[in-house]
Image (cartoon, coloured by chain):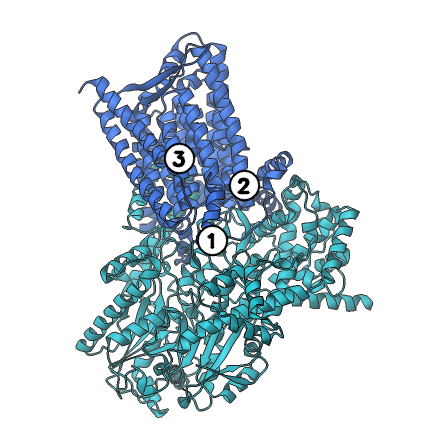
């Protein structure tokens, strides 16, 4: 087939899905069974069709579709740039589009029974479809301006999902906080877009990539890179701007899943799309990595102190996003993509199945001993040695590159958790089993690492320099992971009890950051939260009362 | 001296306030609790007035609901008038009409806590802040498996209050949110809970006569966690120990109140004191009248419901479709749970000469159950009773080893998944696998977790696991043990009313549920087995009754079990209405077994058809019903796998022939009772003091969750957030621990599926005997006299008599 035609078809396939979602969300969502049944049937159908279309687009890509598919271009005043409705057809898009449509398909199916009987179920599906549709545009956008508009639209419809139960004071608070950070991020994105349009004369990701290689690098683009990094930090709920993300369980579970498995990656996505620009402005990229490292260290420790399952999952997302930004900061964009894929699927599942934790805790618990420092040290050394060995075997050359070395050390420390746990098993057989599992997981990791490098590496051609900054940073990363492993393992027990308590209280309260933000929010918008506390609506719908809610809430 | 008297009064007020709080059980044994357990010595309508005034808590639905019931023909105006007359209220029918049409509640202000008065418009509500702070601490203190980094306690920690004080001294939240530096004050607070309480009360100087109300209002402001602390106390008391978690929680809340007092301006303090004074002298007559009238409406509704039940009672044994064979083909005992009523009715209809029996699902064996490899046993009996013997899980040694190995590997995987240093690499190496998992769980091929007792074992391997009540569970020498076993068996059989005409096959059914991704799974299992499935109790009982030595002992005691009689244990799955039978040492004749299996299958079909209409309207094909219900059981997004005990409103203890064939729509607890076989009324006493009380607990849990879901229910399931691993659920982000039932268990979004009615109790026994039992048990006196249940006697001549509050019986038309 003609390549141009193939590209047009593939790009068209990717564009149809979000449009289908948005079209399907056009009919009015009425309270009541009939509207709910129609809505959920329609959205479920669209979600399955959307996933299949995304798979078809992948086939198109495999057959040779490439480059950008531009539907139409809107000239922007005062610059040479155009605001294009364009789709970037590269490997990254081919991963993101099926991933997001898959998650949406699962969520739509899940919400059918989960919210069955909720009088606003139709409205829920409408908002789910709108948010999903807009977010799909985010994942395929080939143009910074288009991306920005799509993410702004996503933010507004998501806001309505977050205060879906708008009689809940906490839901309103969380949604409001979210919109504060979201608007700030949007502003940075708009500024970055404007500066890029002026400085580069284009908003197309692919063209920016080419321009970033050229010797001239105007100040507008430098500034745009920094604004972009700020936007990414805000969108990714990085410390200390994480408060809104850890409170979104005021909305139904599928909304949490949608947030944590999708929308929250918008920052990472734009960073990857704009990677050439960021690589050019390396200090901005490094800053991103530093924030990521800080966030992951704090959030992963806060996570393990949490006592409510959804809070723990939310803190885990904050930490995971920190890790992803760390990978971005290290210039390992393809690994960040691997992380995005894995984490998206894992976290969607974790939220949806969060009520199953009870069953697991009711199960028989085998007696477990606690390992001491020696066990920890031994396990860690074994893990590091194995990881290093495998990395050498896969020819990753960790010794010459501090960044690669950091990754190898992270994997080694992670897998050593299995070694440490396994060392406490009662028999040599089971200990050997644990060791085999650890090595196997490392093997899986390295294979994926290589595969992703192969598939997605070309999307992000350049890597970071081997500067002193990066050498210091890589060392800092390795030490941080060593510290995390130690403090959760034998480390905290070795501290004096008073220290343990102080550290615990501070972590358990998330270092109080969120309370600060809440206080400021109240100062500025007191009237927003003046909602009376009410019970769930236990009134028994009659036809009339349905009519009333209908007229009152029909516009929503 | 004066100080001592005052302190004593204070402590009495503390005791009084704490006694008002009902316990809540954790998610691994989530049984029903009467949320008004602390109020049963108080009159029903009075309690409504009191709770409404204290904290705005509701004990009735609004007038509009009653109006709807009247419009739907479920409530007659004359009945309301008659009931109102009992409260010395004379109403004409037009007055009743007018009453029902206008929605209003006399204005009342709840008792204002200092934290309510100090509300600042430009800051988060203090009550929310305190709730989050205290709740978060309690979650850490009681955490049962969620956090990997648990709260480090000091070595000399003295209990809940002291732990909180240590925690609060290090917690900077109050200054961050703008209250002030509480640590300065906290350092002056004694470490010991009671002393801290005194310290706080001296600062607060709450007016005399108001203290216990104020303390209760404080506890109610953190009511869910207060119930949790009450549970700790309850469990300790059941084992003859003592704990003081609830008073210590009160100390925490009081110290907060006193600290706020220090930060409050003089005007605010005055405003607060004036509020207390106003509350104390507020007018309550309009509210009393309102609540009396609402109870009158409730009684009219209950009367209407009762008539529907009583109309179906058979007047003579001959009229009843019950089997009259001298030796039935089959006897099958079920738990009194309302869900078994439907199944029993259908089983009797499909198998002639089958006799069914209703009895509490633990079959009277006061068990606890210990799984292999676990050092703790868990209760397997109604939570009101202490366990007296331990049954053990038994399985082949190599299987246990295999199971432990698998579970250990799972724990190792979990560590890898959740540890701070490895969760990132976990996601990268294994995250993709969760995509496949999500797909297969969405399609029902797989579930997110196995049922708790099946973990680490395949279905085939599960068949090799069985519970054993070993001789070691009984005390004394061999002879005494044999004697104890026989005595237990006798007690069981007499309780079941099964002392002669044994069928060839006697089935004892436990019940359980099949649900997926449901934090409240235990709430659907057998309440008489402390929120576990009834399997262990049924199997242990059957083994006992099949034991040759026990049978010969029974013969000496006058109970002759024919040698060809076989007992078998079974399981009734209430979500799927499927049954399964467990093998035992004796086996029945194959053709009989086959016949019984077919009957059970057909009874299941009919039950499913009856039940499915309430879940998925318009299904009339039994295969489709089975398919749909099976799907609901394994669907991880299902929030309404079954309606469980919704609708329960009656308790009937009578011979089965009275109700045989009657369609009670799964709304009645059916306990078999024959006064003729119960010369000393020992069985009647047992029924009235145990199963009846438990049934009323269940009934009032449904009642409370329906009329005030915010305080006595657990809110919206789609927002549930499991806290402390097994402790309970929060709704959304934080706030109070939620108790009771979720909205989804009561309401299908459009219609209430549980009509909040009090339990109407029908017992076929002599009035004098019942009067005696009621008088001898304070709990029953309270429940009956204070109108928490409505008691009727079914007389031998088939007339009905209502037990009047305070004594005396009045004939009611049947």
- The disc numbered 2 marks a residue on which chain? A
**Residue at the disc numbered 1:** B725
What residue is at 70 percent from the left and 68 percent from the top?
B12
* Chain whose colour in the figure is blue: A
In 3D space, how far apart are the residues under numbered discs 3 and 1 (Cα atoms)? 35 Å
Asked which quadrant contains residue A44, the reply is top left
Asked which quadrant contains residue B671, the reply is bottom left
In 3D space, how far apart are the residues under numbered discs 1 and 2 (Cα atoms)? 27 Å
**Horizontal placement of A461 versus B694: left or right?**
left
- The disc numbered 3 marks a residue on which chain? A
Q: Are marks 1 and 2 in contact (CB under 8 Å)?
A: no
Q: Position of residue B340 (x, y in %)?
A: 35, 71
Q: Do the residues labelled 3 and 1 touch (CB within 8 Å)?
A: no
Q: Nearer the viewer, mark 2 or mark 3?
A: 3
**Residue at the disc numbered 2:** A172
Q: Quadrant of the N terminus of chain A?
A: top left
């Amino acid at each position: 087939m003609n390549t141009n035609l193939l590209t047009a078809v593939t790009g068209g396939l990717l564009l149809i899905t979000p449009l289908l979602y948005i079209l399907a969300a056009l009919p009015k969502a009425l309270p009541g069974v009939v509207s709910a049944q129609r809505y959920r049937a329609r959205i479920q159908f669209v979600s399955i069709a959307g996933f299949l279309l995304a798979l078809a687009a992948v086939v198109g890509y495999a057959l040779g579709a490439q480059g950008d598919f531009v539907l139409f271009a809107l000239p922007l005043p005062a610059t040479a740039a155009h605001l294009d409705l364009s789709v970037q057809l590269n490997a990254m898009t081919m991963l993101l589009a099926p991933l997001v449509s898959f998650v949406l398909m699962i969520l739509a199916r899940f919400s059918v029974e989960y919210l069955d009987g909720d009088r606003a179920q139709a409205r829920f599906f409408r908002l789910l479809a709108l948010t999903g549709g807009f977010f799909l545009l985010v994942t395929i956008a080939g143009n910074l301006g288009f991306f920005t508009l799509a993410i702004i639209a996503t933010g507004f419809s998501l806001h309505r999902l977050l205060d879906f139960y708008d009689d809940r004071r906490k839901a309103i608070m969380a949604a409001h906080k979210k919109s504060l950070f979201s608007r700030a991020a949007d502003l940075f994105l708009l500024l970055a877009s404007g500066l890029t349009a002026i400085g580069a004369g284009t908003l197309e990701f692919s063209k920016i990539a080419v321009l970033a290689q050229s010797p001239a690098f105007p100040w507008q683009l430098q500034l745009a890179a920094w604004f972009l990094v700020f936007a990414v930090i805000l969108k990714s709920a990085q410390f200390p701007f994480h408060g809104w993300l850890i409170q979104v369980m005021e909305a139904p579970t599928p909304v949490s899943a949608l947030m944590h498995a999708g929308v929250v990656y918008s920052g990472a996505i734009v960073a990857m799309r704009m990677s050439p620009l960021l690589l050019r402005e390396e200090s901005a990229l490094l800053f991103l990595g530093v924030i990521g490292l800080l966030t992951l260290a704090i959030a992963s420790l806060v996570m393990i102190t949490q006592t409510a399952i959804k809070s723990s999952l939310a803190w885990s997302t904050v930490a995971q996003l920190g890790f992803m930004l760390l990978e971005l900061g290290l210039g390992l964009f393809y690994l960040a993509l691997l992380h995005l894929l894995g984490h998206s699927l894992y976290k969607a599942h974790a939220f949806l199945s969060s009520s199953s934790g009870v069953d697991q805790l009711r199960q028989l618990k085998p007696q477990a001993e606690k390992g001491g420092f020696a066990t920890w040290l031994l396990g860690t050394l074994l893990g590091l040695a194995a990881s290093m060995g495998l990395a050498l075997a896969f020819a990753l050359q960790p010794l010459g590159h501090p960044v690669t070395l950091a990754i190898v050390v992270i994997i080694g420390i992670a897998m050593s958790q299995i070694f440490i746990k396994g060392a406490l098993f009662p028999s040599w057989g089971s200990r050997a089993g644990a060791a085999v599992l650890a090595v196997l997981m490392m093997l899986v990791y390295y294979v994926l690492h290589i595969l992703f490098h192969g598939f997605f590496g070309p999307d992000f051609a350049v890597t970071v320099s081997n500067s002193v900054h990066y050498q210091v940073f890589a060392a800092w990363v390795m030490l941080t992971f060593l510290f995390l492993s130690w403090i959760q393992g034998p480390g905290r027990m070795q501290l004096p009890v008073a220290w343990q308590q102080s550290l615990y209280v501070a972590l358990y309260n998330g270092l109080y950051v969120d309370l600060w933000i809440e206080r400021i929010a109240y100062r500025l918008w007191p009237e927003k939260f003046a909602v009376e506390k009410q019970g769930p609506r236990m009134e028994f719908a009659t036809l009339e009362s349905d009519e009333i809610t209908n007229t009152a809430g029909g516009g929503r | 001296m004066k100080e001592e008297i005052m302190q004593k009064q204070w402590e009495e007020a503390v005791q009084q306030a704490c006694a008002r709080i009902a316990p809540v059980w954790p998610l691994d044994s989530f049984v029903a609790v009467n949320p008004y357990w602390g109020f049963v010595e108080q009159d029903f309508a009075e309690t409504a007035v009191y709770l409404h005034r204290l904290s705005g808590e509701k004990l009735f639905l609004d007038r509009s609901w009653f109006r709807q019931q009247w419009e739907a023909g479920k409530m007659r105006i004359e009945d309301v008038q008659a009931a109102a007359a009992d409260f010395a209220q004379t109403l004409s029918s037009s007055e009743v009409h007018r009453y029902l049409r206008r929605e209003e509640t006399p204005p009342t202000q709840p008792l204002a806590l200092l934290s309510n008065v100090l509300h600042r418009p430009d800051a988060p509500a203090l009550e929310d802040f305190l709730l989050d702070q205290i709740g978060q601490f309690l979650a850490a203190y009681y955490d049962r498996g969620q956090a990997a980094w648990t709260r480090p306690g000091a070595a000399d920690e003295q209990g809940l209050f002291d732990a909180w004080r240590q925690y609060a001294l290090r917690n900077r939240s109050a200054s961050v949110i703008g209250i002030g530096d509480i640590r300065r004050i906290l350092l002056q607070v004694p470490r010991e809970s009671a002393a801290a309480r005194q310290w706080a009360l001296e600062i607060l100087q709450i007016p005399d006569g108001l203290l216990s109300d104020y303390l209760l209002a404080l506890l109610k402001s953190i009511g869910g966690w207060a119930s949790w602390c009450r549970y700790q106390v309850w469990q300790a008391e059941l084992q003859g120990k003592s704990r003081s978690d609830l008073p210590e929680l009160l100390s925490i809340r009081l110290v907060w109140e006193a600290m706020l007092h220090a930060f409050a301006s003089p005007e605010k303090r005055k405003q607060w004191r004036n509020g207390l004074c106003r509350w104390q002298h507020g007018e309550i007559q309009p509210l009393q009248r309102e609540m009396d009238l609402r109870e009158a409406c409730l009684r009219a509704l209950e009367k209407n419901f009762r008539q529907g039940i009583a109309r179906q009672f058979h007047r003579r044994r001959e009229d009843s479709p019950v089997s009259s064979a001298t030796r039935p083909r089959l006897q099958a005992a079920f738990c009194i749970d309302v869900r078994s009523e439907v199944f029993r009715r259908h089983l009797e209809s499909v198998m002639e000469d089958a006799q069914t029996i209703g009895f509490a699902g633990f079959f009277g064996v006061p068990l606890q159950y210990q799984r292999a490899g676990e050092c703790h046993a868990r209760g397997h009996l109604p939570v009101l009773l202490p366990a007296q013997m331990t049954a053990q899980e038994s399985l082949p040694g190599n299987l246990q080893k295999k199971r432990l190995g698998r579970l250990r590997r799972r724990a190792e995987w979990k560590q890898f998944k959740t540890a701070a240093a490895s969760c990132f690499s976990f996601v990268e190496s294994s995250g993709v696998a969760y995509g496949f998992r999500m797909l297969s769980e969405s399609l029902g091929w797989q579930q997110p977790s196995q049922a708790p007792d099946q973990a680490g074992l395949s279905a085939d391997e599960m068949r090799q696991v069985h519970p054993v009540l070993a001789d070691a569970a009984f005390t004394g020498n061999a002879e005494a043990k044999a004697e104890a076993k026989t005595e237990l068996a006798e007690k069981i059989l007499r309780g079941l009313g099964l002392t002669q005409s044994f069928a060839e096959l006697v089935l004892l059914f436990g019940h359980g549920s099949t649900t997926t991704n449901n934090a409240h799974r235990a709430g659907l299992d057998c309440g008489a087995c402390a929120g576990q499935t009834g399997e262990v109790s049924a199997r242990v009982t059957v083994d006992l009754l099949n034991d040759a030595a026990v049978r010969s002992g029974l013969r000496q005691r006058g109970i002759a079990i024919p040698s060809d009689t076989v007992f078998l244990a079974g399981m009734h799955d209430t979500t799927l209405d499927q049954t399964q039978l467990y093998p035992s040492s004796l086996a029945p004749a194959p053709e009989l077994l086959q016949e019984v299996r077919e009957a059970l299958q057909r009874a299941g079909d009919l039950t499913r058809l009856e039940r499915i209409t309430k879940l998925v309207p318009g299904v009339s094909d039994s295969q489709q019903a089975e398919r749909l219900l099976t799907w609901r059981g394994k669907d991880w997004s299902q929030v309404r796998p079954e309606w469980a005990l919704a609708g329960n409103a009656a308790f009937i203890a009578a011979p089965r022939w009275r109700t045989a064939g009657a369609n009670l729509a799964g709304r009645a607890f059916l306990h078999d009772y024959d006064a003729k076989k119960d010369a000393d009324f020992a069985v009647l006493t047992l029924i009235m003091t145990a199963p009846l009380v438990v049934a009323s607990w269940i009934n009032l849990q449904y009642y409370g969750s329906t009329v005030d879901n915010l305080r006595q229910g657990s809110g919206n399931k789609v927002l549930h957030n499991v806290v402390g691993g097994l402790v309970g659920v929060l709704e959304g982000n934080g706030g109070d621990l939620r108790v009771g039932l979720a909205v989804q268990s009561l309401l299908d979004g459009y219609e209430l599926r549980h009509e909040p009615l009090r339990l109407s109790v029908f017992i076929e026994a002599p009035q004098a005997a019942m009067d005696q039992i009621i008088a001898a048990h304070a709990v029953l006196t309270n429940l009956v006299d204070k109108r928490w249940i409505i008691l009727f006697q079914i007389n031998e001549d088939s007339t009905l008599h209502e037990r009047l509050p305070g004594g005396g019986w009045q004939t009611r038309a049947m």
